Amino acid sequence: TQELRWIEMVTKMSCSNDGTPIRLLGTTRDITDQIELEKELLAAKHRLEEAEITGRFGSWELDLKTMSGRWSKGHNAIFEFYDESRQP
């Protein structure tokens, strides 16, 4: 059976002192599993955002070292902060 595979290719060109290309060196890697996991993670994030808004709850975090924080979409909705750029 045929299936779609995601491939990452990285290539480096070596040149002579005058800039003439003399060699290509490359690697190829199957990143299909990584892409699928990223899709699943994104879908779970969207489900959590919807659950927060529907349930009228939210979450937040604060990095005590940098004193920077993040509010979830559900948190912002509770306080009617609809501008997603608004963060603590």
Image (cartoon, grey):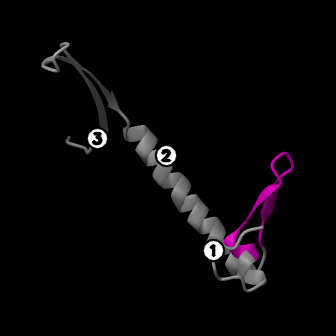
Q: Secondary structure at mark 3?
A: loop
Q: How many marks?
A: 3
Q: Nearer the viewer, residue 53 or 11?
A: 11
Locate residue 85 relative to residue 36 in the image: left or right.
right
Q: Is residue 18 left or right of residue 79?
A: left
Mark 2 burial class by Cα count in 10 Å: few <14, some 14-19, many 20+:
few
| Circle number at residue 84 | 1
Residue 1 on the magenta span:
no
Closest to the observer, 43 or 21:
21
Q: Residue at x 20, y 13 (%)?
A: 17
The amino acid at mark 2 is: Leu
Quadrant of the image occupied by residue 77: bottom right
Residue with the mark numbered 3: 5
Q: Residue 58 location in percent, x, y?
A: 77, 71
Which amino acid type is shown beneath numbered disc 3? Arg
Mark found first going from the N terminus, 2 or 3: 3
Tell me the magenta residue range: 58-75
Marks 3 and 1, the one that precedes in the sequence: 3
Residue depicted at x 74% and y 79%: 55
Residue at mark 2:
37
Q: In what quadrant of the picture does the N terminus appear?
A: top left
Nearer to us: label 3 or label 1: 1
Q: Quadrant of residue 32?
A: top left
Disc 3 to disc 1, C-alpha distance: 35 Å
Give the farthest residue toward the front.
18
